[in-house]
């Protein structure tokens, strides 16, 4: 934070509560690892409430086992049994100290160690601090380079014949950029989908995300097919820990390679920078364990001359707002993948929430994250994910 107001010095974490809520799913969506959202089946999000001396803040974790190892069950137990006891009583403003306590409670291995669980608490603390002072998160940081963030439309059609309809839907809502998941089918079928998107949106920014689905040789072959289609970035083509393969791919790919799952912690980005193995770094709040570490990662990318792009985890409005604050702080000026509104209804959000119009999101101006949470609705939507 840029400063610590005297009203915050005595605020200490009193209680941390978790609520696994079942949110309405608007449509189906999948990645190379499997389903992310299934129409007709509620989408589970874990909301976290941190309380301190009559003030509270809210955060969100988005369990997607098809994308990462954390589940709704593991997030709830990690927070309730390990993270909450480790930080209860600590000053709310000491975000660095909280993250250090998290790493002692759930230590890092090859990855950051339960980033979704840690990130939800960190997000809630940011919300609490902003609400205690009556200012947005960006004021806490002392940086906000833009008030609006352009969004990309996620093309969820899985065949070339479905694509035109999905692109037209996004275009009708004012979206001018599109993202496509590949690695779900054969390379030929994936290419047919990307070509169909390009045919439906000839001049739009277009990028693809493989979610670790390829080998180095397969990714290079795919990149050579994508380049003539004007694809602006090839996101996470290889497994997250294939540093050597990503370095080789970056050297030879005609399409810039963007890293997502590879960048769990700022030190991961430092490694890729030292090895000259990254073109683009994806900023993603939950993947990196919250806003505190995400700020460090983005600042490192900026200082090293690595281009930043933005993404989310099909978040509901709390995660959406947190990402908007982060992306605006660094002035990310390319369309970002914050697709939660396409797939999930944030039934708990009331009153003034995140405004999206014409494919552009306004960075919330209210205190904290700027999302008003109806706790009664949260409790009504809560489910016991640990029940046998």
Image (spheres, rainbow, N blue to C red):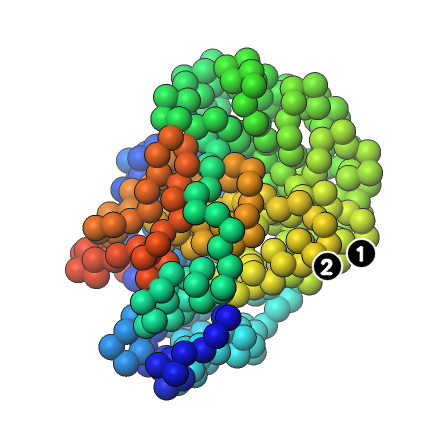
Image quadrant containing the C terminus = bottom left
Q: Is residue 77 left or right of residue 265?
A: left
Q: Residues within 10 Å of mark 2 (few under 14, many from 20)?
A: some
Q: Secondary structure at mark 2?
A: helix
Mark number displayed over residue 78: none
Contact? badges 2 and 1 (CB < 8 Å): yes
Residue 230: give x, y in percent of width and height.
65, 22
Residue assigned mark 2: 270
Q: Residue at x 39, y 26 (%)?
A: 174
Q: Quadrant of residue 92?
A: bottom left
Residue 87 appears left or right of 234: left
- What percent of the width, then of the height, locates residue 15? 32, 77
Secondary element at tag 1: helix
In the shown orientation, is residue 68 left or right of residue 124? right
Q: Examine the rendering and report whether any part of residue 313 can be seen.
A: no
Q: Is residue 370 visible?
A: yes
Residue 114 placement (x, y as % from top left) = 52, 63
Rate crowding at label 1 as few (under 14), some (14 to 19) or many (20 or more) other CA atoms within 10 Å: few
Residue depicted at x 55% and y 41%: 333
Image quadrant assignment for residue 87? bottom left
Where is residue 91 drawn, in percent x and y? 42, 82
Residue 85 higher or lower than 299, as above or below: below
Residue drawn at 28 percent across, 74 percent down: 55
Vertical relation: 84 (above or below) 89: above
Give the numbered dot on residue 274.
1
Which of 310 and 43 lies nearest the eye of the viewer?
310
Establish if 79 lies above or below 161.
Answer: below
Report the residue at 70% width, 19% height from top: 228
Q: How many numbered marks does the figure carry?
A: 2
Q: CA distance from mark 2 to mark 1?
A: 6 Å
């Amino acid at each position: 934070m840029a400063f610590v107001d005297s009203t915050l010095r005595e605020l200490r974490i009193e209680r941390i509560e978790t609520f696994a809520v079942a949110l309405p799913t608007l449509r189906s969506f999948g990645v190379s690892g499997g389903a992310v959202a299934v129409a007709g089946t509620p989408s589970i999000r874990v909301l976290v409430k941190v309380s301190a001396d009559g003030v509270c803040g809210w955060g969100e974790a988005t369990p997607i086992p098809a994308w990462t190892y954390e589940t709704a069950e593991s997030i709830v137990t990690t927070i309730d049994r390990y993270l909450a006891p480790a930080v209860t009583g600590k000053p709310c403003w000491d975000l660095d100290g909280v993250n250090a306590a998290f790493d002692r409670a759930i230590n890092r291995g090859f990855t950051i160690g339960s980033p979704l669980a840690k990130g939800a608490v960190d997000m809630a603390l940011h919300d609490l601090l902003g609400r205690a002072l009556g200012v947005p998160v960006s004021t806490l940081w002392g940086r906000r380079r833009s008030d609006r963030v352009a969004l990309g439309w996620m093309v969820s059609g899985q065949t070339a014949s479905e694509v035109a309809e999905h692109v037209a839907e996004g275009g009708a809502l004012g979206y001018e950029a599109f993202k496509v998941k590949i690695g779900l089918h054969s390379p030929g079928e994936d290419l047919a989908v990307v070509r169909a998107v390009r045919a439906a949106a000839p001049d739009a920014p277009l990028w693809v995300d493989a979610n670790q689905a390829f080998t180095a040789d397969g990714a290079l072959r795919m990149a050579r097919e994508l380049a003539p289609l004007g694809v602006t970035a090839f996101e996470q083509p290889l497994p997250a820990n294939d540093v050597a393969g990503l370095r080789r791919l970056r050297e030879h790919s005609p399409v810039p390679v963007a890293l997502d799952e590879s960048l769990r912690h700022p030190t991961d980005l430092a490694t890729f920078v030292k090895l000259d193995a990254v073109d683009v770094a994806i900023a993603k709040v939950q993947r990196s364990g919250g806003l505190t570490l995400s700020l460090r990662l983005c600042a490192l990318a900026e200082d090293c001359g690595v281009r930043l792009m933005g993404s989310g985890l099909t978040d509901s409005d709390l995660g959406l707002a947190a990402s908007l604050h982060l992306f605006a702080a660094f002035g990310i000026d390319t369309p970002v993948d914050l697709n939660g509104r396409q797939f999930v209804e944030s039934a708990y959000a009331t009153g003034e929430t995140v405004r999206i119009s014409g494919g552009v999101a306004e960075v919330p101006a209210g205190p904290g994250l700027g999302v008003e949470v109806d706790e009664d609705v949260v409790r009504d939507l809560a489910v016991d994910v640990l029940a046998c």
